[in-house]
Image (cartoon, rainbow, N blue to C red):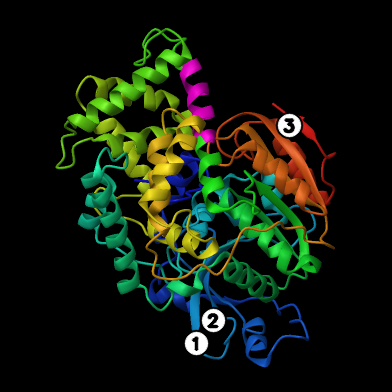
Amino acid sequence: MDSRRLLRTSATALAAAGLILSGCSGGSDAAASRTTTSAPPAAAPSSLPGALKTFYGQKLAWRDCGVPSFQCATLRAPLDYAKPDAGEIELAVSRVRATGPGKRLGSLLVNPGGPGGSAVGYLQGYAGIGYPAPVRARYDMVAVDPRGVARSEPVECLTGPQMDTFTQVDQTPDDTAEVNALSAAFKVFSAGCAKKSRAILPHVSTVETARDMDILRAVLGDEKLSYVGASYGTFLGATYAELFPGRVGRLVLDGAMDPSLPAIDLNRDQTAGFETSFRAFAADCVSRPDCPLGTGSVAAAGEALKKFFRDVDAEPVPTGESRPLGESLATTGVIAAMYDEGAWPQLREALTRAIGGEGSGLLALADSYYEREPDGAYANLMFANAAVNCLDLPAAYAGPADVAKAVPSFEKASPIFGRGLAWAALNCTSWPTPATGGPHRITAEGAAPILVVGTTRDPATPYKWAQSLAGQLSSGTLLTYEGDGHTAYGRGSDCIDTAINAYLLEGTPPADGKRCS
């Protein structure tokens, strides 16, 4: 069962990051004794209340955190920016220093999306070692887990067994009983979040996280923020530019969101994006003699997948575990592979086995999507995802009757995924904390040039969102990758990487409208 709006970087990058999620835990006593203090912070704006100045004036105590070359620290931020002296939260930060040669350009903050993806895990598992060498040579690569995420006072909602139950609930209800069961599942999820995370739940909005990033910018000693945000991270970066246009340095927004859309439109557009991605997968699949969806047309492959979903809805197939593969987990497994065309061979094999009656391959893909560990524990990705989304935008629906009315438009957007993704958008309806944000255009008047990157067949952030955001931003420049997969930087296009590297290193964006393949 998918959250209302799950926007993530590619599955492979996040899987790599997930291998070292413990890298910035408390650390040993010996590690804690090897501390260094950050550079003097950049001056806090004179208009800040005194209570905020104490946060802007803090110094980070960097320590060894168990991952070679990386350091970790804890950043303090107010729990409630409206009452900055009424309590604080602690945010996990990690960095790897610039390697040289060349003049150091300051810090480059990275965020992989989600909301709910661990930026620290992404930095340590991919960005800090896998970004192009010229960029790592001249920037300190830095990440902070957003409030409510991973190591930064994570939102918690359900136990592992409860999540197992939640992810198996039928998300394409066929009758009143199944509609009631799905609604009840969302209510149980929401109630669990309210019970376990009541204090932080009202304070995990994107606006608050963007304000945390400005504190980090100042504490790191940077006059302006340089940043690469992917997927949901583009909304976070655009929000920062809206709040602090004069402090924008070099911002790359890759796999862009459109902040002007209400929740239902975001969900419907993303549904269409998954359909586009599936059709690209199907075109590749049917050209191969071993395609489990046949060797005919793309349309026939789509019908074959729909039949498979109907079959496992009626009779789930075994997986070798206590969790059989029903329609919900099977759909999630297929969607997981849409994020990166590098996962298509794995999907073909998993579908072949599942159609043959053995569902462990698709279950593994679904588990990677949900960040479920082999021991049955879940990362807090799905909890944070719902908490941020439901705070940032009013719920898509008032109740199940609204979903039923919307289903036809979702099925038009995607005959394969539409019905399930329409019902998935019900999850904020019973959320315990009212939304504090709303859809609006972001112009960021006065900001330095901002580079917006879009992929033409991106499943999770449709290309038209990048076109829209680049058009909204007063200084936006659009860079297009004509290809498949979610996001573009570091995914194999020399043209894309060269353009982004030049912008990060020299400050000059490519010509607006540049296209790469």
Labelled pair 1, 2 in contact (Cβ < 8 Å): yes
User: For residue 277: magenta?
Assistant: yes
Q: Is residue 298 left or right of residue 351?
A: right
Q: Position of residue 350 (x, y in %)?
A: 31, 26
**What kind of residue is marked 1?**
Gly
In the figure, 324 relative to 236: above or below?
A: above
The numbered mark at residue 80 is 2
Q: Residue at x 54, y 81 (%)?
A: 80
Foreground pick, 34 / 381: 381
In this rendering, which labeled residue sits more in front, label 1 or label 2? 2
In the figure, 201 relative to 253: above or below?
A: below
Residue 341 visible in rendering:
no
Q: Residue at x 56, y 38 (%)?
A: 486
Which quarter of the image is occupied by the N terminus? top left
Q: Position of residue 222 (x, y in %)?
A: 74, 69
The numbered mark at residue 495 is 3
Mark 3 and mark 1 lie on one chain; the one further toward the N terminus is: 1
The numbered mark at residue 87 is 1
> From mark 1 to mark 2, how far is it between C-alphas?
7 Å
In this rendering, which labeled residue sits more in front, label 3 or label 1? 1
**What kind of residue is marked 2?**
Asp
Magenta region, residue range: 272-284
Labelled pair 3, 1 in contact (Cβ < 8 Å): no
Labelled pair 2, 3 in contact (Cβ < 8 Å): no
Q: Secondary structure at mark 2?
A: loop
Which quarter of the image is occupied by the C terminus? top right
Mark 1 and mark 2 lie on one chain; the one further toward the N terminus is: 2
Mark 3, residues whose alpha carbon is within 10 Å: few (<14), some, or many (≥20)? some
